[in-house]
Image: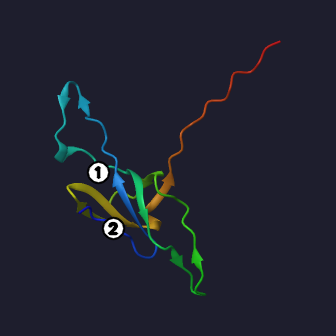
Amino acid sequence: MPMKVKPLGDRVLVEPVEEKEIRKGGIIIPDSAKEKPTEAVVRALGTGKTTEKGTKVKFEVKVGDRVLISKYGGTEIKIEEKEFKLLNSDDILAVIEEAVEPAPAKTT
């Protein structure tokens, strides 16, 4: 049976995006020497942060967003042989949006 994880509070479950194999001068760098990924895809959201007055603060990200995360933040977990990170929402630094090139200007 597939396992489903529902983060609590202001926590976010993300799946790190592995960087493509890095080559320097034709040498393949082993996994142990590669940087930890700082890019991830949001897979699940908690209920949100609660203020001192008891109101909920909505997340600035949604499931499926590609985000930049704090390099050493969060807790690494494994679910059905896949690597995930459980982070506080504060460990998400930015949402990565696809750049849209402007349409070429019309010449008359």
Give the camera-side residue of 86 and 74: 86
Say which residue label 2 marks: 5
**Relative to residue 28, is residue 2 depicted above or below?**
below
Q: Considering only order in the chain, which callout, 1 or 2, is on the residue closer to the N terminus?
A: 2
**Relative to residue 8, is residue 73 depicted above or below?**
above
Give the x, y percent position of residue 84: 30, 58
Give the camera-side residue of 22 and 87: 87
**Relative to residue 52, is residue 29 depicted above or below?**
above
**Relative to residue 65, is residue 30 depicted above or below?**
above
Q: Amino acid at mark 2?
A: Val
Q: Residue at x 22, y 58 (%)?
A: 80
Give the x, y percent position of residue 94: 50, 54
Is label 2 or label 1 in front? 2
In this rendering, does residue 73 appear at all?
Answer: no
Say which residue label 1 marks: 36
Q: Residue furthest front?
A: 1
- Label 1: state its secondary structure: loop
Q: Residue at x 51, y 58 (%)?
A: 62
Q: Quadrant of the N terminus?
A: bottom left
- State which quadrant residue 43 falls in: bottom left
Please rate how many residues cluster around mark 1, counting C-alpha atoms within 10 Å: few if below 14, some from 14 to 19, many from 20. some
In this rendering, does residue 77 appear at all?
Answer: yes
